[in-house]
Image (spheres, helix red, strand yellow):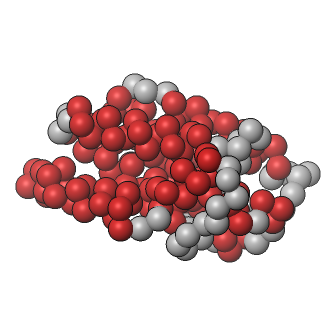
Amino acid sequence: WKPKIDKVATKTLEACIYQTETKTPRLRNFEKVARNDGEKHEGIFYDDSDVYKALEAMAYSLKNHPNPEMEKKCDVWVDKIAAAQQPDGYLNTMYTLNEPQNRYTDMSMHEDYNCGHMIEAAVAYYNATGKRKLLEVAIKWANHFNSLFGPDKKHWVTGHQELELALVKLY
């Protein structure tokens, strides 16, 4: 596996970062939420998950290939994600930018799937670096979600198993 792991660290992540920061609006959507200037979401409704998946890969890479520049980039991304989190813990750039009144109204729109991947990234980054900032974002979101859904609360059935897997890791 070492050649594949090395290739991820030296080539694949470079492509992922380019796609996330430059080629697509994925990371820019988090910046727009933080600015709160009435800007609209660009891209696909599940694009947040791709930011989290790339960040998770970056975190795993740091375990095998410590890289101060990569860690610094992760910290920048974490700051952007944290700045986009709403005061109640909610985190989804598409709804926050375009339809905040419609949060959790359509189970097929990946709100929990996106944050499942955010939790996975938070756990991976904490395990790689010991830094808690994204982990605290994940905990705040999980508490928010738990306050709304479950027995005797709003009914919600996700279309993916991602959230459940992520919550086990967070636990």
Name which quarter of the figure residue 105 lies in.
Answer: bottom right
Farthest residue, direction right: 152
Q: Residue at x 8, y 55 (%)?
A: 3
How many tags in the picture?
0
Q: Residue at x 68, y 74 (%)?
A: 108
Q: Residue at x 26, y 40 (%)?
A: 70
Residue 22, relative to residue 86: is it above or below?
below
Residue 65, given in percent of the width and then of the height, sits at 17, 39
Residue 104 visible in the displayed image: no
Farthest residue, direction left: 3
Residue 41, relative to residue 167: is it above or below?
below
Q: Quadrant of the C terminus?
A: top right
Q: Quadrant of the N terminus?
A: bottom left
Residue 9, given in percent of the width and then of the height, sits at 18, 50
Residue 153 visible in the displayed image: yes
Residue 11, given in percent of the width and then of the height, sits at 16, 58
Residue 71, relative to residue 49: is it above or below?
above
Left or right of 32 on screen, residue 5: left
Q: Nearer the viewer, residue 170 or 87?
A: 87
Residue 156, given in percent of the width and then of the height, sits at 78, 63
Left or right of 32 on screen, residue 144: right
Q: Residue at x 58, y 54 (%)?
A: 32
Left or right of 131 on screen, residue 171: right
